[in-house]
Image (cartoon, helix red, strand yellow):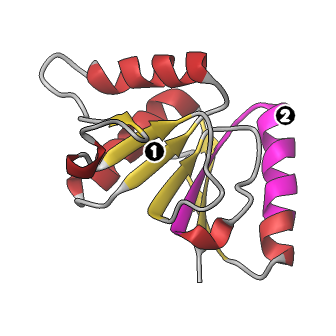
Amino acid sequence: MTRIDFYTNVAQPQDFACRLSATVFRKKERLLVWLDDERALDTFSNRLWCMDDTAFIAHCRLGAAEADETLIWLTASLPVDLQHPVLLNLGSKLPANPDHFSRILEIVGNDEHSLAVARERFREYRSRGYDIQHHDMSQK
């Protein structure tokens, strides 16, 4: 069954998303990062390439020629039939088929809008019977 990980009280969600991607990358797990649109995808891609002066996280777009050799894929359009180990949901919706992932990572910022969206997602995942883990990042 799919496990849902909520990372709450995140001060800088985009920076945290990069660090979380790096953690999954170091574990040699495949990660699909789902964003709302091409602009958000390009912005996040640039962040991954420029994490710091000496590090970057290799990644590509879903469907790119090099995807088979790349652990991290980015997409603005989630295919309904795609099965993948880990999904980092940076988009505004829930995936249509959460069961296609072993884990789904949800990042929750400190602002009211992020909290409201997270509450709704939590209720939806819980109503479907998913295993939900909570990680309070306020002290990290």
User: Identity of the amino acid at label 2?
Assistant: Glu
Kindly identify the residue that appears in the image at 41 percent across and 41 percent down.
63
Q: Which mark is residue 112?
A: 2
Residue 49, above or below 123: above
Q: CA distance from mark 2 to mark 1?
A: 20 Å
Visible residue check, residue 12: no
Binning the other alpha carbons within 10 Å of mark 2 as few (below 14), some (14 to 19) or many (20 upward) gives: few
Residue at the left extreme of this rendering:
54
**Disc 1 packing (10 Å; few <14; some 14–19; many ≥20):** few
> In the drawing, does residue 90 fall left or right of residue 122?
left
Considering the numbered disc 1 on the image, is that residue within a helix, a strand or a loop?
Answer: loop
| Residue 19 x %, y % | 37, 39
Relative to residue 101, is residue 131 depicted above or below?
below
**Disc 1 residue type (three-letter):** Lys
Q: Is residue 128 above or below residue 43?
A: below
Which residue is label 1 attached to? 140
Q: Nearer the viewer, mark 2 or mark 1?
A: 2
Disc with the residue nearer the chain's start (2 vs 1) = 2
Q: Position of residue 96 (x, y in %)?
A: 74, 59
Q: Which residues fall within the magenta stretch?
A: 101-123
Q: Residue at x 16, y 16 (%)?
A: 53
